[in-house]
Image (tube, rainbow, N blue to C red):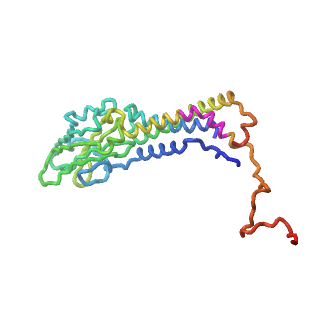
Amino acid sequence: MVFFRVPGRRPGSGIRLLLVAALGLLVLLPTGTMGASSGPSSPVVVSAAAGPGSVTANVTWNGVNVNTAGGASSALSIDFSKSANVTFTWNTPTGAVNPTDARLEMIYFGFALSTRDVVNTGTAVVHFAVMTWTPGALVYVLEGVYEIKASLLTPNGSSVWSENFFVRASAPLSIFAALPIILIALIVWELYSVARSGRQAMLGQKGKTPPTTPEEPTPSEPSSSPTGEPASTGPEEPK
Amino acid sequence: MSATTHGAFAGVVLGICFVLLGQQFGYINLTDLTAAIVYLVIAMVVGAAVFGAIGMALGRGYLRRHPPTPQEWKPA
């Protein structure tokens, strides 16, 4: 019996495909749906630049003004496994619409990965909002440097103020998030794969050459016609 | 699949992995979509070139050390 090796197929490629698929699923996390949002979702709007006569606001993250974390190098260090107290305070000039929605969006690859809202549904006019921010399920998935957009929205959904700042999130024990573990496993597997590439390529070459001739049936093998009757090998001799 | 192709494919995957891992460890900022795509494309191209060359060298080295015999070119 002759075995044929499939050209180009190498051992372990199924595991590799599985890891790449898992990585793709992690990277393509649903945007804006991680965690519970305490208010109604509204469309993403272009933030209005702060200017004369516009809303001015101040945001603190665990008591630290987010103004100090305007760049990735000065990102606020946070622990993904703990919640953060975020406080919005703002001043609305006379005649302007007072914001009723304070929002935090975590941005990854240009998309909002996690959105939290604090919505004032009462009739009283307030100029502050307090939010307890947690990453939700992201604590088991991600770590690293992320940009967070804090914004204030009016009841019609338009943004009257926004500010971006950076946080450096660390996973529990600094490594136990799903994405880094999968990435490290993929890197180790790929380096092992490259180290064996010469041998694997030669094994693949061996399966390609030379073309084999099909086996001829031996006389001892029984053969039958499609109808199930024994095939005749010639004219029957009279008994 | 030749050793060069094998190494190049591995290099593409490694390039993506290194960029994402760099972001996870806080060395790269992938907030902006355009910048993130540029990082990924550059890493994939560099990875394919570098690891394609490594794969080619490893393949040639293996064939030099293990020249195929006539018996090996028969079907397994």
| Number of numbered discs on residues | 0
Q: Nearer the viewer, residue B2 or A115?
A: B2
- Residue A168 figure quarter: top left
The reply to whether residue A169 is visible in this rendering is no
Q: Is residue B20 left or right of residue A200?
A: left
Instruction: Please name whichever residue, A149 or A154, is drawn nearer the observer in this view of the structure.
Output: A149
Find out whether residue A197 is within the magenta segment. yes
Point out residue A85 in the picture as x, y percentages from the top left corner: 20, 39
At 59% from the left and 33% from the top, the residue drawn is: A196
Relative image position of residue B7 (x, y in whole percent): 58, 35
Q: Position of residue A36 (x, y in %)?
A: 27, 50
- Residue in view at x 72 percent, y 33 percent: B68
Q: Residue furthest right?
A: A238
Q: Is residue A239 visible?
A: yes
Q: Main secondary structure of the magenta part?
A: helix
Q: Nearer the viewer, residue A89 or A131?
A: A131
Q: Is residue A122 above or below residue A16?
A: below
- Image side of residue A67 versus residue A232, left or right: left
User: Which quadrant is home to the C terminus of chain A?
Assistant: bottom right
* A233 is within the stretch colored magenta: no
Q: Is residue A200 rendered to the left or right of residue A222?
A: left
Residue furthest toward the left? A124
- Viewed as shown, does residue A163 lie left or right of A222? left
x, y percent for residue B73 = 73, 39
* Residue at 74% in and 46% down: A211
Q: Which residues are magenta?
A: A192-204
